[in-house]
Image (spheres, coloured by chain):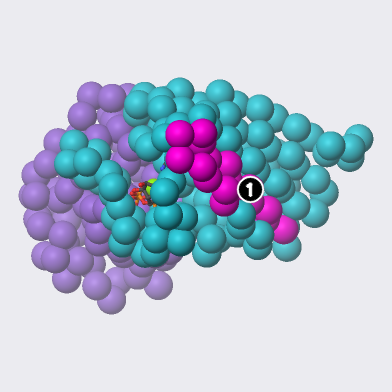
Chain colours: A cyan, B purple
Amino acid sequence: MSADCLRQEYVVSGNNFASAGSASEEVKSTLKKLGVSSADIRRVAIAMYEGEINMVIHAGGGVATVDIYLDRIEIVLADKGKGIENVELAMTPGWSTAPEDIRALGFGAGMGLPNMKKYTDKFEIESEVGVGTTVKMTIYFH
Amino acid sequence: MTVNNLADLLNAKIVNLADGERELSTGYCGDFLSFVMGKAPADCAWFTVMSNVNVCAVATLADCGAVVLCEGVTPDDALVEKVRLQDVNMLMTDYDAYTAATLTAGRFK
Ligand SMILES: Nc1ncnc2c1ncn2[C@@H]1O[C@H](COP(=O)(O)OP(=O)(O)OP(=O)(O)O)[C@@H](O)[C@H]1O
Ligand SMILES: [Mg+2]
């Protein structure tokens, strides 16, 4: 982190749907105040919400660290959840382990990770079973 | 077509009207939230039967112009509270999503 970057950190609590998305909502309003275009804000908001909700549903919560620069935003979502056994498989559109009660809420299409990749300029995911998952995303502003 | 026009066309009940004059770009039908986020265009009217609190987060973050709850579905209390707080336009109609779509098709600019 350097002086020309604004850092924000959010604790995302697990299995709490009332507050799920609040970190993404705050980042959205920060970017709005900074004058970032609505198309770029939309990409950031969707990618971050998908990551946030994955931590809520699949990992029992985690931490989102957001660095905002003049030309880009870097988002790191880190959790100490159960991890992903096969990341390549998890990235496949339609693949999901979401249980029935979570599907009833509208989650579990298996499209969250593909959306995160689609809406970001850089997307990295590292995961270890029993240790946790870290997702790093960068979006450049136009 | 504005949110007010949409409400008239669908004989809709108002859950929350934050900006009735907001111009809608097109429509999108879907219930899986990640399909909506991956495919629904900004400023669209989103037709769905999902009625839990997460609908508000999706509508806000994906910049939906209005949410239309179809089939006479009523929103959870937590959802009503959140759309009011976050200024999301939300309507309720007795039509199913297909009928609502056919009634509004061709009317978006
Ligand atoms: N942070 C995480 N910790 C553990 N497992 C995860 C995590 N993120 C994703 N997964 C695993 O990867 C799968 C695919 O994730 P993805 O977000 O694409 O779909 P989903 O969350 O199941 O459904 P959707 O995002 O469409 O609501 C999940 O079902 C889960 O098994
Ligand atoms: Mg997901």
Residue B107 coordinates in the image, percent (x, y) = 29, 71
Q: How many marks?
A: 1
**Was residue A129 drawn as part of the magenta stretch in this picture?**
yes
Q: Which residue is drawn at 61% across and 54% down?
A: A124
Residue at mark 1 = A136
Q: Give the range drawn in magenta.
A: A125-140
Please identify the quarter of the rendering in which residue A30 is found.
top right
Q: In which quarter of the image is the C terminus of chain B?
A: bottom left
Task: Name above or below for residue A119 compared with residue A67.
Answer: below
Query: Given the image, on which type of amino acid does mark 1 rest?
Result: Lys
Label 1, residues with CA under 10 Å away: few <14, some 14-19, many ≥20: some
Q: Which residue is drawn at 68% across and 37% down?
A: A66
Provide the major secondary structure of the magenta segment: strand
Residue B97 coordinates in the image, percent (x, y) = 16, 60
Residue B91 visible somewhere in the drawing: no
Near-viewer residue (B88 or B62): B62
SS class, disc 1: strand
Task: Name above or below for residue B16 compared with residue A142.
Answer: above
The chain to which mark 1 is attached is: A
Q: Which residue is drawn at 45% across and 40% down?
A: A129
Residue A107 coordinates in the image, percent (x, y) = 29, 46
